Amino acid sequence: MIQRYSAPLSAAEQREFVPFVHELIAVAFATIRPFFISGLAVSTKADASPVTLADRNAETAMRQLIEQRYPLHAIVGEEHGVKDGRDYRWVLDPIDGTRAFITHCFLFGTLIALERYDATGYRPILGAIGHCAAGTALIGHQRVTTLYAGDGSQRPVSVRRCQRLEDATVLATSHWTTGEQRHPHSARIEAVVRRAKLYRTWGDCFGYFALATGGADLMLDPRLAYYDVAAIVPVIEGAGGVVSSWSGGNPLDQPSLIASAGPLHPIALELLSS
């Protein structure tokens, strides 16, 4: 039985919140777009990661929409922290892939998750990956993930079935020997990559976009933050894929991700833990 880490979205919640997620994506895109390829100043945060006015302003714009529409909801944002609330919680990463953004690479995106509180705590019920430069977005929940294109069209998407690592396209956010993603067991990652048909560092949220739309087969991220993970889980699960932490557990409790179409998951886990 496939383990799911997102919670089901009710029909009433779908009617209420999916249109609002489109509003959040639109305001994020409108805020970010004027800053892209503009010579924007870059600052360095305490964790040595870069941040720009585009990151901060986009999150501010989304938070303002949420607070106007749902003042009792909680919010967790990468740039502006935590607002306490009840019943539902929004998790925002305004620009996932700021390093891509500041180097004028089109692969950066916006991550939005909606979580519902239950007996086990907050669990994501809805996730979105929006790509401002391409004008496209994925919105997913347990039953379906839908691609919304810039021309106004929409269609459901699904992962592609790949049985053998030797036939697989494997993606990662950055090479495992770099300072950004240096991993204590880099030889294990290399064992996966060496067997793959194709390996590329087309990562951050784009790697999961590629997987959910059938363009790649395995995405690896050994070290993440919660706001990186929450939106990804329902998007991949809605597209028929599988997610886990690096150790095979819940990626929301152990923020890291292995995402696949399914058949490759035990193969990857065995190689990464051997």
Image (cartoon, rainbow, N blue to C red):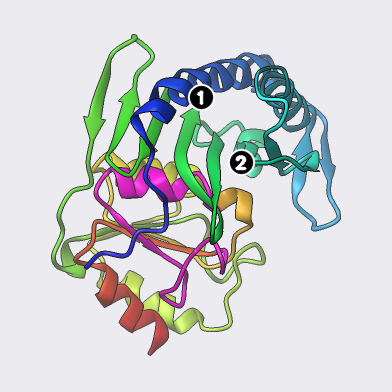
Is 216 or 118 nearer to us in this picture? 118
Judging by the rendered image, the residue that carries numbered circle 2 is 87
Q: Are marks 2 and 1 in contact (CB under 8 Å)?
A: no
| Mark identifier at residue 21 | 1
Mark 2 Cα-neighbour bin, 10 Å: few <14, some 14–19, many ≥20: few
**Image quadrant where one finds the C terminus:** bottom left
* Range drawn in magenta: 229-255
Residue 99, x across and y down, in percent: 65, 43
Which numbered disc, 2 or 1, marks the residue closer to the eye? Answer: 2
Magenta-drawn stretch contains 234:
yes
| Mark identifier at residue 273 | none
Residue 80, x across and y down, in percent: 80, 38
**Residue at point 70% right, 20% down?**
35
Residue 151, x across and y down, in percent: 34, 9
In the rendered structure, which disc, 2 or 1, sits on the residue that comes first in sequence?
Answer: 1
**Residue at point 67% right, 14% down?**
34
Looking at the picture, which amino acid does disc 2 mark? Asp
Whole-number angstrom distance, CA of label 2 to CA of label 1 = 17 Å
Quarter assignment of residue 125? top left
In the displayed structure, does residue 65 sit left or right of residue 273? right
**Residue at point 42% right, 52% down?**
6
Magenta-drawn stretch contains 241:
yes
